[in-house]
């Protein structure tokens, strides 16, 4: 129940800052989102890193910092080794008037669940992720 309250609060706050716009090509965004979902489901840090901007703010369970694309890939690889994926689902997505967009997801392992918040910009035909949060949820 606390998870749902937290999720609703997160989405509500996010919507205050992000107003939907037609500025992004939804087909490209949906294709990128489908690929990102597959990479989370398979625990592929290498494939996810293809979407990272040259620098990324990474927060994994409160361990936060700004990292290069390569550093973030290795940190994410360690996360996937420690918490192998069982499933990943996109719970919500949105965008603002500019090229900024966000996705909220749920990453599940055999005994843990994590809330994923991805923030990125649409650069050409790719999403470039500039922020990734992975926060363990108490179940």
Image (spheres, rainbow, N blue to C red):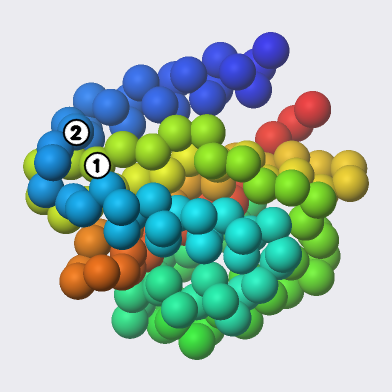
Q: Position of residue 34 (x, y in %)?
A: 50, 55
Picture residue at 81% right of the left edge, 43% below the top: 112
Give the residue displayed 62% in from the left and 60% down from the top: 38
Residue 4 appears in view: yes
Q: Residue at x 48, y 40 (%)?
A: 104
Q: Quadrant of residue 29?
A: bottom left
In the image, 28 versus 55, the foreground residue is 28
**Could you tell me residue 101's position as x and y percent?**
28, 48
Residue designated by label 1: 95
> Mark 1 touching mark 2, by CB under 8 A?
yes
Q: CA distance from mark 1 to mark 2?
A: 5 Å
Q: Residue furthest front?
A: 27
Against 2, residue 119 (above or below) is below
**Residue 17 picture location, percent across and down:** 21, 33
Is residue 130 visible in this depiction of the protein? Answer: no
Q: Can you tell which mark lies on residue 105?
A: none
Percent x, y for residue 64? 50, 61
Residue 129 versus residue 78 in the image, above or below? above
79 left or right of 118? right
Residue that carries the numbered disc 2 in the rendered image: 20
Label whose residue precedes the other's in the sequence (1 or 2)? 2
**Residue depicted at x 23% and y 25%:** 16
Quadrant location of the N terminus in the rendered image? top right
Dot 2: few (<14), some (14–19), or many (≥20) neighbours within 10 Å? some
Element on which disc 2 rests: loop
| 79 or 39, nearer to the observer | 39
**Residue 53 appears in which quarter of the rendering?**
bottom left
Q: Is residue 2 left or right of residue 116?
A: right
Side (left or right) of 22 relative to 127:
left
Helix, strand or loop under label 1: strand
């Amino acid at each position: 129940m606390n998870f749902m309250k937290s999720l609703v609060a997160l989405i509500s706050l996010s919507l205050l800052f992000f107003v939907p716009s037609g500025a992004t090509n939804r087909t490209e965004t949906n294709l990128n989102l489908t690929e990102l979902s597959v990479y989370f489901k398979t625990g592929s840090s290498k494939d996810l890193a293809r979407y990272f901007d040259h620098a990324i703010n990474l927060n994994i369970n409160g361990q936060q910092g700004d990292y290069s694309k390569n550093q973030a890939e290795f940190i994410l690889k360690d996360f996937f080794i420690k918490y192998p994926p069982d499933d990943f689902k996109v719970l919500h997505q949105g965008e603002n008037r500019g090229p900024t967009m966000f996705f909220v997801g749920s990453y599940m392992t055999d005994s843990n669940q994590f809330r994923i918040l991805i923030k990125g910009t649409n650069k050409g035909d790719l999403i470039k992720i500039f922020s990734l949060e992975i926060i363990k949820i108490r179940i």
